[in-house]
Image (cartoon, grey):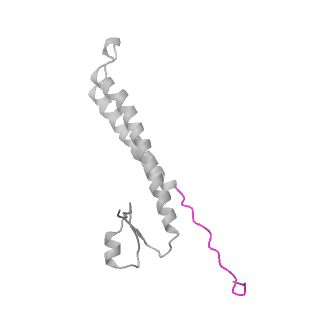
Amino acid sequence: MSATADVGIAIGAGTDVAIESAGIVLVRSDPRDVVGAIELSRATYRKMIQNLVWATGYNLIAIPVAMGVLSPWGIDLSMAVGAIAMSASTIVVAANARLLRRLRLQREPEVIAPINSPA
């Protein structure tokens, strides 16, 4: 049995080989930033799923409408309306992805022990 890692993390002050082979490079030499990297990756994955669900649902409705499914009821959309509708879908997905900027990563407070405290 061999051990493998899903992701490699290097510290920016590390060797060039470690930095080149790592999936994540921490700019600061603070190992607590690993927690932030994990939070960011989880939030990114959630956004990917949200965007996938949105785009799938939107296209399940928009493609048949663009094909003319509503024509028997007198609703016939021009190609320009279809192009605008597809652009709107792209804008919604991009705007949802931009919401990741609001993510505030948690950092543990630094605990500094007094110099005269017993060990």
Q: Which residues are magenta?
A: 103-118
Q: Where does the image place residue 89, in percent across and percent down from the top left?
A: 37, 38
Count numbered badges in the picture. 0
Which residue is at a point 50% across and 68% down the rendered structure image? 33
Q: Where does the image place residue 18, in percent across and percent down from the top left?
A: 35, 74
Residue ranking furthest to the bottom: 116
Placement of the N terminus among the 4 image quadrants: bottom left
Residue 40 to residue 115: above or below: above
Q: Where does the image place residue 103, in percent across and percent down from the top left?
A: 52, 55
Which residue is at a point 41% across and 37% down the rendered structure image? 54
Residue 90 to residue 30: above or below: above
- Within the magenta stretch, is there residue 41? no
Q: Report which quarter residue 111 is drawn in.
A: bottom right
| Left or right, residue 18 beside residue 47 | left
Placement of the C terminus among the 4 image quadrants: bottom right
Residue 58 to residue 115: above or below: above
Residue nearest the viewer, comparing 2 with 69: 2
- Within the magenta stretch, is there residue 113? yes
Residue nearest the viewer, comparing 38 with 102: 38
Residue 60 to residue 7: above or below: above
Residue nearest the viewer, comparing 64 with 30: 30
Which residue is at a point 41% across and 42% down the rendered structure image? 51
| Left or right, residue 69 beside residue 26 | left
Q: Main secondary structure of the magenta part?
A: loop
Residue ranking furthest to the right: 117
Which residue is at a point 37% across and 27% down the rendered structure image? 61
Residue nearest the viewer, comparing 86 with 11: 11
Q: Where does the image place residue 55, in percent across and percent down from the top left?
A: 38, 37
Q: Report which quarter residue 82 is drawn in.
A: top left
